[in-house]
Image: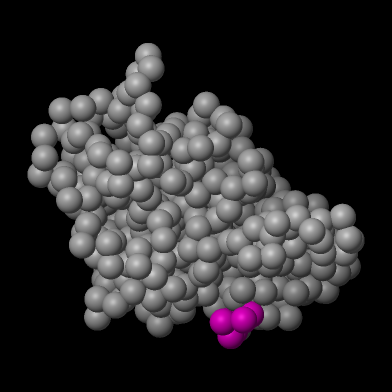
Amino acid sequence: MKTPFVTKELVERIEKDYPTPFHIYDEKGIRENARKLKDAFSWNKGFKEFFAIKATPNPFIISILQEEGCGVDCASIQELYLAEALHMGEGDIMFSSNETPAGEFAKARSLGAYINLDDITLIDFLDKECGVPETVFCRYNPGGFYNVSNGIMDNPGDSKYGMTRQQISDAYRRLMMLGAKHFGIHAFLCSGALTDDYYPMLAKDLFKLAVELKEETGADIRYINLSGGVGIPYRPGEAPCDIKRIGEGVRAAYEEIVEPAGMELAIFTELGRFMLAPYGHLVCKAIHEKHIYKEYIGVNACAANLMRPAMYGAYHHLTVLGKENAPADHRYDVVGNLCENNDKFAIDRELPRIDMGDYICIHDTGAHGFSMGYNYNGMLKSAELLLKEDGSVKLIRRAETAKDYFATFDFCDVMKDAGYKR
Ligand SMILES: *Cc1c(COP(=O)(O)O)cnc(C)c1O
């Protein structure tokens, strides 16, 4: 059973000001979870979470995380601008970009961001653009498959990220020649890992690598960035990760490998999904029903508002608000209005009987939800709302209008009479 943090009564009240569909976030849940993470790693002196800004690039949400002691992980200049607008300073930004366009390292450096190099060829590119900073991170890719535990694995050997083992040594040597003094290691080897074993296993591998690299190159390694990847239970019945246990697992590896080597390493994370996904809902409304070879419920949101089901076949739990305890004795495809047959939030889902006008809450959309949105079929992105700790609801991004959709034609007259002057 998954319980939404909104009720039918609340959504009815909200809809008077902000029509569905909208994304809504739960401030209380976000803060409590961020505090648990911080507590789980409080044994590590330099611990810091750099929230993966791509997951939920909303300044109001990031400010909440900032108040809880988090920085941000950026990968593009727009994401850097967002961090800059929030006065993120020295040591608050991790720049984990790849295939980095000209000018972005210089911008990152000017903001005091940590620069995390995805490839060895970026060293000279960085040096030419803005010089090599005192502290540099390198992203590691061990290749092959990364088997965590009971069927949870990923395939770094087939991913575009990071450097080979040999390249990391060569990169550190070259960076030292160009003036780097302190180093970090970064790796992202398994995505959405719903297990307490991933971070401890990754930490162990990266701690060992740090000890080896120090011996091999003499580099002063100070940081281990475990990146993102900790999963969340999208399906009812799945158990959430125990972040305290994860922190203790990383600590055990630290005591086993780092302390005997006489090293001191600050642990960084770049969690996105774990920080936000459970604390966001996409709330929409049933507007049509269709009875053909299957039973369809058409809602007023579509894949443009939440792409994960269409893109990955991802499961997102649905709750028909006000019918939380009704028997799930109907079977529906719940679909959006894109002219794309993969625009389905649920396929063959057992749900209570849905009546037109019922509100449907789509769970776990707080990360990689709104942010992956797009405008296919001329669809507009929804508003984002914040359910504050005091129970009030605040607009944190207005809904797009047709005028926004056509804004990039503002240099010409062709579209000036298109019905977008709302
Ligand atoms: C996407 C991403 C993250 C966050 O991943 P989650 O699965 O949301 O935890 C962290 N670091 C980098 C470099 C990423 O690209």
Q: Is residue 87 magenta?
A: yes
Query: Which of 294/54 is in front?
Result: 294
> Start and end of the magenta stretch?
84-89
In percent of width and height, residue 96 lies at 62, 60
- Residue under the image location 30 percent in, 47 percent down: 357
Query: Which of 102/263 is in front?
Result: 102
- Residue under the image location 25 percent in, 39 percent down: 355
Query: Which of 320/258 is in front?
Result: 320
Quadrant of the frame with the N terminus: top left
Residue 146 appearing in the image: no
Q: Is residue 82 magenta?
A: no
- Residue under the image location 81 percent in, 61 percent down: 416
Q: Is residue 344 left or right of residue 317?
A: right
Query: Which of 285/183 is in front?
Result: 285
Q: Is residue 76 left or right of residue 395?
A: right
The colour scheme applied to this rendered structure is: one colour
Residue 416 appearing in the image: yes
In percent of width and height, residue 24 lies at 37, 63
Look at the magenta stretch and give its main secondary structure.
Answer: loop
- Residue under the image location 25 percent in, 37 percent down: 354
Q: Is residue 13 left or right of residue 184?
A: left
Q: Is residue 369 left or right of residue 410?
A: left
Residue at the outermost top position = 293
In percent of width and height, residue 83 lies at 60, 76
